Amino acid sequence: MSIEFFCEYCGKSTPALKPSSWRCICGGPWSLPPGPPFDPDAITSAASGVWRFHRQIRLPSGHYPTLGEGCGRWLRANNEPSIALAHLEPTLSFKDRGVTTLLAWASLAAQPPLIEDSSGNAGGSFAAYAAAAGIPCRIYVPASAPPGKIAALHAFGAEVVKIDGPRFNTTEAAIADNDGTYCSHAWNPMFLEGTKTMAFQWWQEHKGQFPKRIYVPAGQGSIVLGLFYGFREINAAIPDFTVPAIMPVQHRTAASLWEPINIDGPAVEPRPDDVPSIADGIAIDQPVRKEALITAVTQTGGRVIAVGNEEIRNAQRKLTTMGVWAEPTGAVAMAGHMQVGDDDDALVVVSGHGLKTGKV
């Protein structure tokens, strides 16, 4: 299989299994062209809810690290939106979907140790899958990352490097490390090959029937783009498939998508209680694929919602009444749904488990 990454900014390309660098020389992120039209007949009996859709994932056939990811189902409660339990994964975060495909790519294309930067969930997932693959990894984390998430990195045998200061400092430190291969879940497009399988799995499990709107937390926006790319591949094969509106929910301290999409709305101003943000998983000032995120939201007829700490805490409590324990970032989508006052014809994605932080 011959695949190439390409840069949406300047048009340059590079072999996906032997890229010239972790990003294009112009500074743009590598991307993949649209995948093949979704083929329901190609779904396999693989144990993983990600690797059942191997045809849609641009990697050669092989034995790749898997922990049985792709577990989360929908919870349907009376007079409430459906809840996508995307946090019920091996490491209690949706990131496992993207990390299994990213580590599969790394097993073919990267020189160990694998280097990643993360505020917590992606790092924990990365460390778990690297351990399962027998590949050493080094994870750069903000010094302020929750202790439980750092403990998970150590448990899986990762080398942990704590970086002081804002989240961006952590990324810069990881990029500057030349001893290994930088395998960022934000920059490497193979991560999105895993998150897009959410769309395929939900299509299969719900016979192609979706609510009108899907609320998702958005920092780097890998759920937004994964769903958008997955829906695009479904729509290419099934023209009458109605693509749901994707509704990214951001924290008021990091609402980078608000201004370019909600051009007629008031500016987002954090409130005193919003600092520091309790939603550490989406504390991203400028997502790597910002333009692609704007396209995904506008083309699906979605909108951006900005919430703060108080709304997130209320959403956490609301979810617990439904039997769902979410960490603050994992409850962000519910906070957005509650703020809009939407009806039950919606799907709310819970992305991370409450055990990550241990409090509500």
Image (cartoon, grey):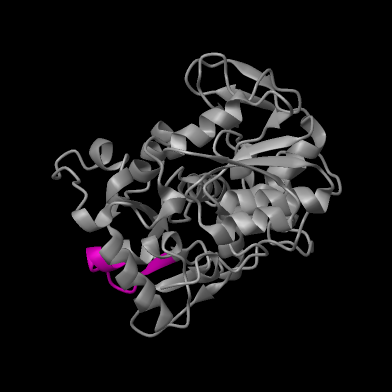
- Image quadrant for the N terminus? top right
Residue lying at 43% horizontally and 52% vertically, measured from the top left: 280
Q: In the image, is 227 to the left or to the right of 313?
A: right
Answer yes or no: is residue 53 visible: no
Question: Closest to the observer: 336 or 161?
Answer: 161
Q: Is residue 250 above or below residue 203?
A: above
Question: Closest to the observer: 41 or 157?
Answer: 157
Give residue 105's quadrant in the image: top right
Q: Position of residue 102 (x, y in %)?
A: 69, 42
Q: In the image, is 63 to the left or to the right of 113?
A: right
Residue lying at 23% horizontally and 68% vertically, measured from the top left: 341
Q: Position of residue 194 (x, y in %)?
A: 64, 49
Residue lying at 19% horizontally and 53% vertically, measured from the top left: 271
Q: Position of residue 156 (x, y in %)?
A: 74, 55
Q: In the image, is 350 to the left or to the right of 155?
A: left
Give residue 92's quadrant in the image: bottom right
Q: Position of residue 59 (x, y in %)?
A: 75, 39
Query: Is residue 155 located in the magenta-colored stretch of the structure?
Result: no
Q: Is residue 267 above or below residue 22?
A: below
- Image quadrant for the C terminus? bottom left
Answer yes or no: is residue 198 visible: yes
Query: Is residue 342 located in the magenta-colored stretch of the structure?
Result: yes
Give residue 178's quadrant in the image: top right
- Magenta region: 337-348
Q: In the image, is 252 to the left or to the right of 360?
A: left
Question: Closest to the observer: 127 or 18?
Answer: 127
Q: How many marks?
A: 0
